[in-house]
């Protein structure tokens, strides 16, 4: 569904934010896009959505070149940005104006999602709090049933109950011929719903793998139960797998991938053989 070949992306040719990115993303997946501030998460999403012109390389999304912004492409993709500016109109007026561009839009689904997230009805969109802006944008995007959903820090501004509701909504999505990419620096907000993880580091993708493959390759636990750990952080440790599948501690794994060259090299070798 998404193919990137030697993608260079950013705002200046001489100093791209992303360099030599090669990536293939498949349907029926929820990808977690992780990386430190400035690593290129938003740049990547902007480029996939056609909001930013690539500096080099090739990008194909659903068979389209995103930058061309063709109508058939736009109706099949939804992008929920971190910073939102909603127009000065009511929710009903927004739906009446914009749902026409979304052939699969369901008003019933949208109202259901809004109620699940405890949205505050009756307030003009431009007067909403950050949290309610996020709820509205998420509900409209998902109710449009696009084939690709891009979400940049969707849990920013949401309270604990709304985050839980969002996880339930995403976990209940039919992903047949669809995929979702969620960028987040709050690992705990997404670790229970993603199937795959993409990690950015120093302008490049250092990992694109399913959690299943990671769980088969590594063992997660405390330092007293793992001999010769590949990575240690406090009382937590990560070691080589000993045959049984291990539930992935995503936060510890992410920190290991960012801080340990030994971990990155080991996992790269193991994952490439699967």
Image (cartoon, rainbow, N blue to C red):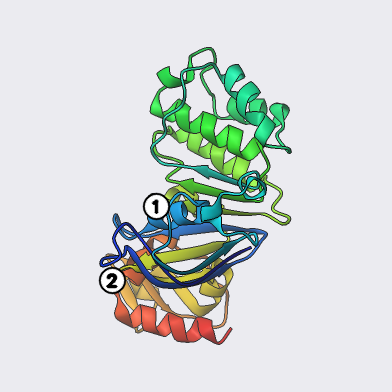
Q: Nearer the viewer, residue 51 or 144?
A: 51
In this rendering, position of residue 268 left or right of residue 150: left
Query: According to the image, label 1 marks what residue?
Result: 42
Q: Residue at x 54, y 67 (%)?
A: 211
Q: Residue at x 66, y 30 (%)?
A: 99
Q: Nearer the viewer, residue 80 or 219?
A: 80
Does the CB distance between marks 2 and 1 fall below 8 Å? no
Q: Measure the C-alpha gap from mark 2 to mark 1.
A: 22 Å
Query: How many tags in the picture?
Result: 2
In the rendering, at what x and y percent does residue 101 appear?
Answer: 66, 35
Q: Nearer the viewer, residue 199 or 8?
A: 8
Q: Residues within 10 Å of mark 2 (few under 14, many from 20)?
A: few
Which mark is in front, 2 or 1?
Answer: 1
Q: Which mark is residue 259?
A: 2
In the rendering, at what x and y percent does residue 214 appear?
Answer: 51, 73
Q: Which mark is residue 17?
A: none
Rendered image quadrant of residue 53? bottom left
Q: Earlier in the sequence, mark 2 or mark 1?
A: 1
User: Is residue 225 among what the camera can see?
Assistant: yes
User: Is residue 192 among what the camera can see?
Assistant: no
Q: Nearer the viewer, residue 125 or 51?
A: 51
Q: From what the image shows, is residue 237 above or below residue 30?
A: below
In this rendering, position of residue 104 left or right of residue 62: right
Q: Residues within 10 Å of mark 1 (few under 14, many from 20)?
A: many
Is disc 1 placed on a helix, strand or loop? helix
Q: Quadrant of the C terminus?
A: bottom right
Is disc 2 placed on a helix, strand or loop? helix
């Amino acid at each position: 569904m998404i193919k990137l070949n030697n993608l260079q992306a950013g705002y200046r040719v001489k100093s791209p934010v992303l360099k030599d990115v090669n990536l293939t993303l498949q349907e029926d997946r929820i990808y977690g896009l992780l990386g430190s501030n400035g690593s290129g998460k938003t740049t990547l999403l902007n480029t996939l959505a056609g909001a930013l012109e690539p500096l080099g390389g090739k990008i194909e999304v659903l068979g389209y070149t995103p930058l061309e912004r063709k109508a058939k492409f736009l109706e099949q993709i939804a992008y929920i940005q971190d910073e939102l500016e909603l127009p000065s109109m009511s929710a009903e007026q927004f739906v009446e104006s914009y749902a026409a561009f979304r052939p699969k839009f369901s008003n019933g689904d949208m109202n259901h999602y809004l109620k699940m997230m405890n949205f505050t009805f009756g307030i003009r969109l431009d007067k909403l709090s950050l949290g309610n802006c996020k709820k509205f944008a998420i509900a409209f995007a998902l109710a449009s049933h696009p084939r690709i959903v891009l979400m940049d820090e969707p849990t920013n501004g949401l309270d604990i109950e709304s985050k839980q509701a969002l996880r339930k909504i995403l976990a209940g999505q039919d992903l047949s011929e669809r995929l979702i990419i969620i960028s987040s620096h709050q690992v705990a907000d997404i670790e229970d719903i993603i199937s795959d993880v993409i990690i950015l580091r120093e302008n490049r993708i250092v990992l694109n793998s399913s959690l299943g493959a990671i769980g088969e390759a590594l063992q997660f636990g405390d330092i007293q139960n793992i001999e010769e750990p590949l990575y240690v952080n406090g009382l937590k440790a990560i070691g080589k797998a000993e045959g049984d599948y291990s539930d992935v501690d995503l936060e510890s794994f992410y920190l290991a991938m960012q801080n340990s060259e030994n971990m990155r090299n080991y996992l790269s070798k193991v994952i490439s053989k699967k």
